[in-house]
Image (tube, grey):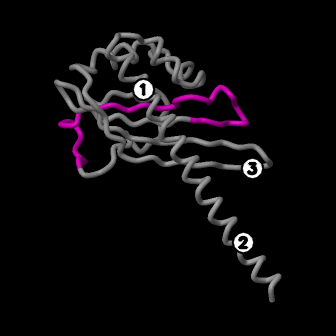
């Protein structure tokens, strides 16, 4: 009886430790995503297209001949002095197949400036054992709050899961 009680206690303790570790990993991804939105905001405010481009995956940048132009359009679209942002959802998915991992995160923010409130969502690959050129942001969507019809829902951009930078005007 004592061995089964010890085994059960070890099992419960293991579950507890795993749950704490999972929360810590989730918090780390929230922080990493927050760093990305802060870079995006800073780069848009300071007119630094290279800083924005550095966040995107190589495959994303190579998939659109107008990518550089879209980055500049985004910078022009982003107006006002930055005040704050609210994170409005984080979705993380990890696929493991034959010991190869693909892990991505979708996150949405409301970004407040003195002129507008922006809704920005992006999909970011933190791991891809199949293609390292997928690492980075694969899609970024931005709109102004007043242009978005689903104000009570988290903004994810469009549902077609396209890669690239998209401004919804």
Q: Which mark is residue 77?
A: none
**Viewed as shown, does residue 118 lie left or right of 157?**
left
Does the CB distance between marks 2 and 3 fall below 8 Å? Answer: no
Q: Position of residue 87 (x, y in %)?
A: 36, 42
Q: Residues within 10 Å of mark 3 (few under 14, many from 20)?
A: few
Q: Is residue 139 above or below residue 88?
A: above
Q: CA distance from mark 2 to mark 1?
A: 46 Å
Q: Is residue 119 above or below residue 165?
A: below
Q: Residues within 10 Å of mark 1 (few under 14, many from 20)?
A: many
- Quarter of the image with the C terminus in it: top left
Q: Nearer the viewer, mark 2 or mark 1?
A: 2
* Helix, strand or loop status at disc 2: helix
**Residue at numbered disc 2:** 11
Q: Which mark is residue 165?
A: 1
**Residue at numbered disc 3:** 97
**Viewed as shown, does residue 106 lie left or right of 129?**
left
**Viewed as shown, does residue 160 lie left or right of 95?**
left
The residues colored magenta run: 125-151
Q: Nearer the viewer, mark 2 or mark 3?
A: 2
């Amino acid at each position: 009886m004592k061995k089964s009680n010890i085994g059960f206690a070890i099992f419960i303790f293991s579950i507890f430790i795993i749950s704490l570790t999972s929360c810590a990993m989730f918090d780390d991804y929230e922080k990493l995503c927050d760093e990305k939105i802060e870079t995006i905001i800073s780069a848009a405010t300071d007119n630094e297209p290279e800083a924005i481009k550095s966040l995107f995956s190589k495959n994303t940048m190579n998939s659109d001949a107008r990518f550089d132009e879209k980055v500049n359009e985004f910078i022009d679209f982003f107006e006002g002095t930055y005040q704050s942002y609210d994170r409005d959802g984080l979705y993380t998915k990890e696929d493991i197949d034959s010991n190869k991992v693909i892990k991505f995160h979708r996150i949405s923010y409301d970004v407040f400036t003195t002129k507008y409130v922006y809704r920005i969502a992006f999909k970011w690959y933190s791991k891809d054992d199949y293609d390292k050129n997928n690492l980075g942001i694969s899609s970024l969507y931005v709109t102004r709050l007043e242009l978005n019809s689903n104000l009570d829902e988290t903004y994810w951009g469009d549902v077609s899961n396209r890669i690239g930078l998209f401004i919804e005007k």
